[in-house]
Image (spheres, rainbow, N blue to C red):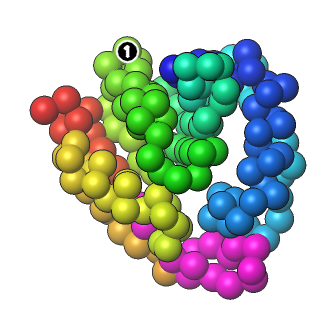
């Protein structure tokens, strides 16, 4: 179930801290330093922060994005699946619910996001884009330095409302 992260802030910070201590956080940082706390928005005007919660109330994921209200688009999409195995049906449903909220409820025109090439999530994003009509708009070479000190490429996507709703 998709819930506002602010309501789960204490539990979220604990789950996030555990995540940072795991190898799964390697691609999350997009830099050579760690933010040990997720900074949550206090309102929903410029940014949305959600958690994916399973049937027993445990946080299994985090999703956030920035809103460009004047231009009706979403950018800076951040997604963490805390389960780590990529098989959570609940998390996948919540991610779909997020896109529905953005396109249908909020009337956004497009969503732009990126992934560091090599991240396991890249194949999921590729399948999502292929299924819902988005596209890869480019690859930025040596665009981000990760915690191992190496530079990695980043793939950029966009998906428009009219494509998603087909």
From where the camera sits, is residue 144 visible? Answer: yes
Image coords of residue 160 (percent x, y) = 27, 39
**In terms of secondary structure, where does tag 1 sit?**
helix
In the rendered structure, the answer to whether residue 122 lies left or right of residue 30 reads: left
Q: Name the residue under label 1.
A: 105
- Chief secondary structure of the magenta span? strand
Give the extent of the magenta segment. 142-156
Looking at this view, name the residue that lies furthest to the front.
56
Is 95 above or below relative to 115? Answer: above
Image coords of residue 17 (percent x, y) = 83, 46
Image coords of residue 109 (percent x, y) = 32, 32
Image coords of residue 147 (percent x, y) = 76, 73
Is 30 above or below relative to 17? Answer: below
Q: In which quarter of the image is the C terminus?
A: top left
Q: What residue is rendered at 82% in x and 35% in y?
A: 13
In the rendered structure, the answer to whether residue 36 lies left or right of residue 133 reads: right
Q: Which of 120 and 104 is in front in this view?
A: 120
Badge count = 1
């Amino acid at each position: 179930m998709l819930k506002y992260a602010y309501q789960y802030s204490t539990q979220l910070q604990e789950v996030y801290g555990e995540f940072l201590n795991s190898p799964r956080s390697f691609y999350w940082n997009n830099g050579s330093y760690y933010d040990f706390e997720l900074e949550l928005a206090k309102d929903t005007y410029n940014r949305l922060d959600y958690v994916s919660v399973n049937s027993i109330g445990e946080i299994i994921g985090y999703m956030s994005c920035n809103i460009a209200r004047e231009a009706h688009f979403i950018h800076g999409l951040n997604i963490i699946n805390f389960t780590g195995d990529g098989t959570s049906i609940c998390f996948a449903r919540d991610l779909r619910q997020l896109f529905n909220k953005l396109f249908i409820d909020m009337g956004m025109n497009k969503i732009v996001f990126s992934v560091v090439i090599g991240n396991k999530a890249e194949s999921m994003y590729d399948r999502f884009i292929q299924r819902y009509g988005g596209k890869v708009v480019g690859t930025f070479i040596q665009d981000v330095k990760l915690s191992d000190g190496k530079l990695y490429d980043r793939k950029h996507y966009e998906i428009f409302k009219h494509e998603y709703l087909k």
